[in-house]
Image: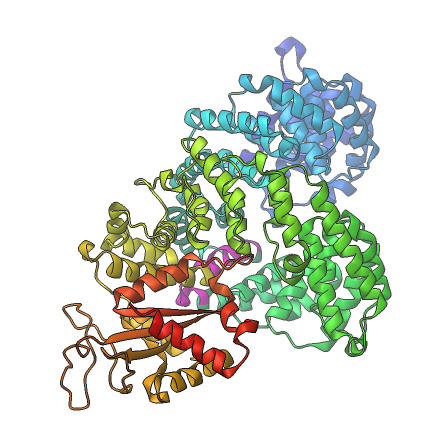
Amino acid sequence: MFRLRTITGRCYLRRFLHGGVANRDQVLEQLGICADEDQVFEVVGKNKAKLNENHVGCAVGMLWQFQKEKPQMLRTVELIKSHPEFLTLRVLAENKIELMGDVMLVDMLYNILRLSVDPCDSLVQHLVSEAWLRLCRFPMSSLSKFAVCLSDQHLQHSPLMGQITNILNQKLSSIDDARILTILMICVSPLVSPTLRDKLINKADCVLDTMDPSHYNNPRRMVQFLRNIKYSYRPLLEKCNHNLLHNVPLMDAENLGIILGLYQSLQFNNCDFRLAAKQRLIELVDSSTDPLSFTKLFVTLAPMAGLDTKERLESIALILADELNAQQALAVAETLEEIHSRNLLIASVIHKNLQVYRSMELARVTQAMILLHYQSPEFFTKLRNILVHFLQYSVYPYEVTMLTRVLSMLPSPRLDTSVISRVDAVLPQCNLNDLNTFAVVIAKWLRNDPSYRHSTPIKYVRLLQTLNHCGRERLCKADRLDLLLEELKYMSGEWFEEMLLKETMVTLQRLKGQISWTNVPELSLFLTRINYLCAPLMDSIASATMEDINKMHYSSMYATLLPFAVLNYDSPRVDEFGCGRCSFDPHLLVLFGYTLAVADCFPEDMVREIFNVDFLAKLDSQLETLPDALNMRIRLRLMELNRAVCLECPEFQVPWFHERYCQQLHKKGNGFITPVQQQIHKMLGEVLGGVNCAKAAVFTPYFYRVDFECVLDRHRKALSYSEQSQLQIPGDGEVRWGLDSVGKERSELPQGAQRIAVDFLDTKSFCKNSRHMKGEAMMRKRHLEILGYHVVQIPHFEWNSMELSTQDAWKEYLRKKIFTELP
């Protein structure tokens, strides 16, 4: 170690030694043989009167270099800061700033900040000021390092960073070093324009081809840049992922966790990377024995691990619990909640460190402890008091929003007026997403207020009025579609639907001229999520897609097609989108295939690829690494796609292999029949001539659940329903009646008879703003007709209308639906 440190010191020293023997500098030579910080300080102490700017720069640089070589837990930065000779170096550095060269100046600032000198310290302030004066002449390597220093001081939005952004824009073509480029990309990310964003992405794409592929931090920083600007540009993402995938065997848990976190933020779930990362993390379990390395491993591996590995990780976490610091304990607690563990031993560590946490960490603590069902009145009382204290002094809208949200999760006998005052003060500064959060919180306050049973307290009325005004005003002032879509990304709930939905659609139509291939996927997802059919917007999406379809990445086609399929809208140009053979991730290909099936489109190549044994095996492996909710959603969509292909494309000869899966779903279901369905069942009995002529909640082949089933003979008279008669699929795949009481198979329905399916369609089957039926309800009708049913659909708005307000009217409605509309 002594030899290694001496070599390190000499390497760092080399830049300061330019002359030969005649120009030997004895102080630099003494620094060059130093093996640790104490020896550096000893040289400084003995030569105070001789130290020039080179000596000071070298000494400070060596101090950081020695610290950098140590593991994080073994660093002694605080001891260095408190050493009297370090103060000497700081004073000398401040006095010699003007004598420093450009490179030395930036290096001094960088090293001083790494040694945890306060950004408000006069030395740091003078170094930044001097660097600003020399900014235009810095080499790009020093410019990138200076940009990092500004970011460390939270000056990402400063005019100084704006100048760096301008210099980067002017000199971008001259940068060939991937490290310099990617560091600058991250630092200036808050300030980049769309034009500069595209130039940086193109440059990064070129640099990736020429850089050393083993330097995986460069593509990692490119992905971080995309995350920072909230732009999931798939071509660059996939190119970076290709490099990162090859370097997985070299990565530690921290790097893997960072990359997976970035991917999650960009909604980029690459199957191959997740599987490789999982395998690498499992390999690192045995060597991750200290609290720091284990915490990083646990947070990354546990959510995607199998049951045995989860149990092993959980056991290790509990053994190390008392050794974890406050931040590590919080990270472990959040992960325990994510994997649905109920082990609360880690809670004692969090309780002990409650005063240590910062405001946003306390918000995470609150959520984690509540979701872990931690029961401790003392803990939550203390937590609530600390949260209120932070809230009273917070001036940041995002912080007030988060603290208010988690406060509403805590049991409270009363609501502090200081909290209401803080919320009221910050509302005009909030974006739409924050306003929506406050709407949910205020609704919860109202429900919990004892006086609400008699009248709405005036304090809440004023808050709601301010909330509504701020929301409408923000929509009226919106002039950039991309920024509006970012605010609308997670909007949902009663307040948004009742107060802002119509205004939102008016605003989107006002801005539809800004719809382009870059924002089409985000707009499409929003329209699908809010279940709102707007023909002008849908037509604009189709036109923008066709205009630049060659620029769009194939993965964005799923999101783009989604509203057309789900909302059952056949735009004049949507058939031109195309769905060629593309290399989708397994889970995304299943979702895309299902979306096309809803739209009654079954590309043979895609269907055969999905229902291939190798593909399904890879899909199974990927699903093990995905969150439970997404895992269940993909499995359900695969079943529904399998059913659709079997029914609509029998020529593809895809087998039905979801029988057991559907039986398990059926067992988990509650089989609940709503009051409206009970009412319809009773009416059907009267219309058909007896309650035995209609059966409720019938499962068809391929496990569709029909609300009511009945059979009419050729004279259109209802047949009595036999409990033993139900549809089954024999081995040959032909749909037949079930078995009778003596075990003999019935051949077919009586000649001329017709099986009827009666379905009540609630609001979920229609678009929110119209009586337009959605795609899934239409697909269901197609499939039931293929199974031999005449399908009678009863829309909720017809059954609950004023016209059908009497028993006779309902019965006449059912007679007309069943008998008159029967072919």
Boundaries of the magenta span: 292-310
737 w.r.t. 194: above or below? below
Quarter assignment of residue 76: top right
**Left or right, residue 46 beside residue 311:** right
Given residues 531 and 3, the one toward you in this image is: 531
Quarter assignment of residue 707: bottom left
In the image, residue 501 lies at what x, y percent?
63, 54
Report if residue 350 is visible in the image: yes
Residue 118: within the magenta?
A: no
Report if residue 232 is visible in the image: no
398 w.r.t. 234: above or below? below
**Left or right, residue 27 beside residue 313:** right
Given residues 656 and 796, the one toward you in this image is: 796
* On-image quarter of the C terminus: bottom left
* On-image quarter of the N terminus: top right
In the image, residue 290 lies at what x, y percent?
54, 57
Residue 308: within the magenta?
A: yes
650 w.r.t. 725: above or below? above
642 w.r.t. 605: above or below? below
In the image, residue 67 lies at what x, y percent?
64, 40
Residue at image point 73% right, 37% down: 153
Given residues 508 and 286, the one toward you in this image is: 508
Residue at image point 60% right, 23% down: 141
In the image, residue 562 lies at what x, y percent?
44, 49
